[in-house]
Every structure is written in C-alpha cells, then in structure tokens.
Image: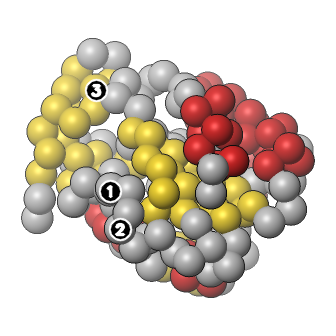
Amino acid sequence: MIERKGAVTFKGSPLTLLGPELKCGQAAPDAVLLANDLSEFRLSGLRGKKVVVSTVPSLDTPVCDIETRTFNQKAAAMGGDVTILAVSMDLPFAQARWCGAADVKSVRTLSDHREAALGLACGLLIKELRLLARCVFLIDPAGTVRYVQLVKEISSEPDYEAVCQALARI
C-alpha cells in the first residue's frame, strides 16, 4: 500500500494518505459507494456527465457542512449536465439526516465507509483517522479526471472559484 506521509495536515499536524495520488488525465476510479438508501452506487454510472466529486472528512463538522452547502448553492449555475457528489465516511443514514436538516437537494451524498474504496483508489484515505481528506476533483463525460484540488490543510475550505473555472473548461 502506498503511503504519502505529510500529504495533508490537520491544524498543522501532518497526516498520511493511503493510496496513489490522483492526477489529471487518468481514468476516474470506479469505486463502489453506498447511497443513502444503502444501494450500491458506481462512479462509472455517471459516464456522459460532468461530475464534481467533493470528498470530506464528515458532514457533521463545520467546514464540511459549509463546503457541501456551498456546492449545493452553486449547483444551479453549474448547469443541468453536472452531477455533484459529496463523499465521506459517514454512514448513509447520517448523510440522509444531514441532507434533510441542511435542505441540501442538489448534491448527492455517498458513503465510502464500507471499504474505503474511493479513498484508497484516489489516495485520499487518512491513515491516522480513517476519514477522507478534503479534495475536489472533476470528471469529464468520458470518465477522465480533469482537475484535482487536494486541500493541504483539511480544516480549510477548497477554492470554490477555481473549481467553477475548471468546470467551465470541461
């Protein structure tokens, strides 16, 4: 297993990411995630669409809450051919509860808790915490990764404008 020590930090403390680094130009991993109703969800099922994937440590934390709500607000401006996913290690039931309480309807929440399949495939699983690092990546309609923004300090928000600008170029 590839270990990338110090790839991200939490409040300045270095953390280790497990798995290979996600890079632009590579095929998007086809990880199996769990939907809020416990059905299996495959990233490959979104072929033909532009996809924004936002990985977060937990929706029940302030920064993850803000990030997911922000992408929910930006969804209309992104266009109808864009699917926005928020992936965390939270249980599907907790994700559904959070979406209801936050009135988030334009972002689909998915859980990687069972096998950490996406986290390991994208090199985003935090070894010390068994949570996902904060990252936003874009997948084009052909299934290729076109943009990756790994947030070095996981207690910080991503650069939303950079994500929107990259999405406009796909």
Mark 2 lies on residue: 26
In this figure, which colouring scheme has been used for the structure? secondary structure
The 10 Å Cα crowd at callout 2, few under 14, some 14 to 19, many 20 or more, is few
The label shown at residue 22 is 1
Task: Give the CA distance from mark 3 to mark 1.
Answer: 17 Å
On screen, residue 54 above or below 121:
above
Residue 168 in the image, given as x and y percentages of width and height: 69, 47
Nearer the observer: mark 1 or 2; the answer is: 2
Q: Is residue 104 left or right of residue 108?
A: right
Dot 2 or dot 3: first in sequence order is 3
Which of 38/151 is in front?
151
Structural crowding at the residue carrying mark 1, measured as other residues with C-alpha within 10 Å and reported as few (<14), some (14–19) or many (≥20): many
Question: Which residue was labeled with disc 3?
Answer: 9
For disc 3, the neighbor class at 10 Å (few under 14, some 14 to 19, many from 20) is: some
For the residue marked with disc 3, what is the amino acid?
Answer: Thr
Q: Secondary structure at mark 3?
A: strand
